[in-house]
Each structure stands twice: as C-alpha cells, then as structure tokens.
Amino acid sequence: MNKTIAVIRGDGIGPEIVGEAIGVLDAVAAKFGHTFTYREAPMGGNAIDAFGVPLPESSLKTCLESDSVLLGAVGGPKWDAQPPANRPERGLLQLRSAMGLYTNVRPARMFADLSAACPLRTDIAARGIDFVVVRELIGGVYFGDHSTATVDGEQKATDIMSYSEHEIRRVAHVAFQMARKRRRRVTSVDKANVLDTSRLWRRVVTEVAAEYPDVELLHMYVDNAAMQIVRDPSQFDVIVTENLFGDILSDEASQITGSIGMIPSSSMGQGTRGLYEPIHGSAPDIAGQDKANPIGTILAAAMMLRYSFDMAAEADAVEAAVDAALKAGCRCGDILLGGGTAIGCREMGCQIRSRI
Ligand code: NAD
C-alpha cells in the first residue's frame, strides 16, 4: 500500500520523538512491503518564527491532502508572550477544526513490565488495564455560549451545554466500529438521571447500537464510571462519552497506566484520516538532550496504522516491538523505576525498530 503522511515535528522534543516514530514506520514499510511518503508540515512555535503564524496555509493544505497526520508537540516558553490568537497551540486548534476532528481516542493500556508504575492496588493492576476512551471533541459545554453578568448585585456565570442527535450519532459510530476491532463491548457514560443532553445521548447511542448487534452496550453514570476506572478497570473495552466527561475520564484513565511519555492519542472525523500524537507536550525542560521517551509517539503511529490505514498486523507488530523492548529492560528516564541506567530517545527508537 502507498500512504502519504503529513509530519508535524513541532517544538521542543517534538522533532526528536517524531524522528523515532518515522524510523519505526520505515521498519514497518520494509517488513510489510508498503511505501510511506512523508510530507513536512511546519506548525507551532517554529512556524511562528519562520512564517509569522502557527499554522501556515501550506501546512494546512499538506495535512488536508495527506492520508493522515503525525504530530509531535507544539509550544514552549519562547512563544508564551505571543498574543492568544497567535500562540503555537492555536495552530493545533485550527488544524483540528479544519480537519473536522470530532472524536478523540485515548487508549489506557498498562504494560506488564511497567506495572510497578501503576498507582492502583497490585491485585487490581494484576487483572490488566486495556481500554480506550472515545471522547466527543467539538460539542457540549466547551463549545456552548459562555457568559458572565451581574444579577441582583452579584456575578452570575452561565455555560450552555447542548448536543444535537447527529453530533452524538457520529461519535457513537466511531466507538462501535472501534469495539469491533477490539473486545466488542461499549460502555456509554452519561448523567442521564440529571441532564437532558445525557438523556438524548443515551437514546441516540442505544439507537446506534442496534446497527452493531455483535457489540455489547452498557450505560454508566459518569460518577460511577470515575469510580469503576480505579476500582476495576479490567471491565472496560471502549468507553464513549461527551466532551466534558471525556476530558476528565481520559486523564484519569491515562494516569492509572504510568508515565505520560507512553500514551498516544488520535483525533478523527469523517473518513479514515486522523491526527495522531502523544498526549504530552513539548517538554522544553528536556528538549535537545536525547532524554525524551518516544514510545507515546511510536504508539500513536501504531494507532495510525490500525485505525487510518486498516493495517492491524502492522500495528500489532509495533505494539509487540514496544512490549519486547520493555521486557528486555529498555527504559528512558521517565520510566526508570527503582534504579538502572536510562537510555536516550534515539536508542529507544533503535531498540524498538530492531524488534519489528
Ligand atoms: P509537558 O507534557 O510538555 O511536560 C510535563 C513533564 O513531563 C515535563 O517534566 C516533561 O519533561 C515530562 N515529559 C513530557 N513528555 C515526556 C516524554 N516523552 N519523555 C519524558 N518526559 C516527558 O507539559 P508542560 O511542561 O506543561 O508543557 C510544555 C509545552 O507543551 C507548553 O508550551 C504547552 O502549552 C505545550 N503542550 C502542547 C501540547 C500539544 O502539542 N498537544 C500538549 C500539552 C502541552
């Protein structure tokens, strides 16, 4: 297969971690007989320096014309004084909106060899953690009207939360399709005992479920879901939820698996093109020192193979290579538990590549 990948290296550790992810993709291409063509798309602080804006037109065009987008991270102290409309992160928001990315997918998966980094009780961690949070990304209270007014001599603030059926339906389809590639169980999280938006959410998700009779659907209130994620995460396969609940639950889910440097994320819209990135930022404190852990970005590349290119065997190979490198004792500084010597970003990339 031939695929074109837009590459946003970004700022800070971005170029280092993306370089290693590309090395792994090249190893996959060589082993499985694919051709990946990379097209550079500058975005973030470096784009402000070179073009005066965080997302140049040419970069946006490259992303929209590619089969998928791989991103490192953007931002850093050098650009903190930029006006809000021209900050590096603004480029990311513009890109998400222009690509119509209405779903964010964040896996919570614990690596057996890093179980010591799991903050949960040993018997709970032993049952395993392997689920994904599918979050609606461009609706709900974050995108409703916000206002603050003086009423009866005091300040009153209001945020409007609204959802339309089509906004719920499209993200529900993503969740059910994802469940079909996993263990076929969807847990829809809402607050239907209190909120109208949640009652609509529950009705529409239930309707969509009828199109996926091979996938089990459960409903759970968000307060219970927050509790169940730490009580017994092994019960979850795919969690689907609205924007605000998903923001909170996906952070909770990623923290129970260990280091921030290990976790990938994807944002998707209509069709198969997605934006794949690690969940962390540009880590300016370790940039340019060969200390960054590239695994989050490498696993983001694996998600791209699985979900955008429908290359399950190739994605499995990348995930297995990461597992094998960890089993062999390879550790960057952020996942070095209880002593030993840390390896650098380049060496970690090399160790994973050699196991594809
Ligand atoms: P951060 O995630 O960059 O760093 C937090 C801590 O985690 C730091 O100590 C860092 O060294 C460490 N860390 C992060 N990724 C690591 C990795 N792969 N390996 C080893 N250690 C790692 O968060 P921050 O410091 O709050 O933000 C730095 C910059 O990144 C800011 O400008 C912020 O706006 C930006 N940011 C960008 C994105 C994005 O591009 N999607 C997301 C979050 C933050």
Image (spheres, rainbow, N blue to C red):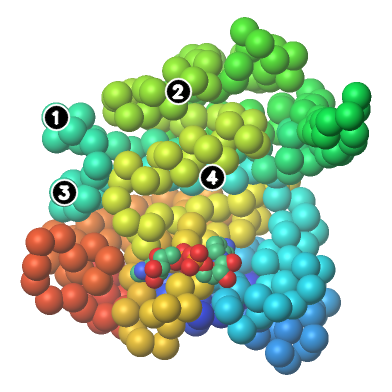
Alpha carbon distance from label 4 to label 3: 25 Å
Q: Residues within 10 Å of mark 1 (few under 14, many from 20)?
A: few
Q: Which residue is mark 4?
A: 105
Alpha carbon distance from label 4 to label 1: 27 Å
Q: Which residue is mark 3?
A: 116
The numbered disc on residue 324 is none
- Specify the quadrant that holds the C terminus: bottom left
Alpha carbon distance from label 4 to label 2: 17 Å
Inspect the image, locate mark 2, and give the three-letter code of the amino acid beneath it.
Answer: Ala
Q: Which residue is mark 1?
A: 123
Q: SS at mark 2?
A: helix
User: Which comes before the other along the chain, label 2 or label 3?
Assistant: 3
Residue 149, located in which quarter of the rendered image? Answer: top right
Task: Give the left or right position of residue 121, taking residue 4 as reference.
Answer: left
Alpha carbon distance from label 1 to label 2: 19 Å
Mark 4 vs ligand 1: CB below 8 Å:
no
Residue furthest out toward the bottom: 50
The answer to whether residue 28 is seen in the rendering is no
Q: SS at mark 4?
A: strand
- The residue drawn where x is 24% and y is 71% is 333
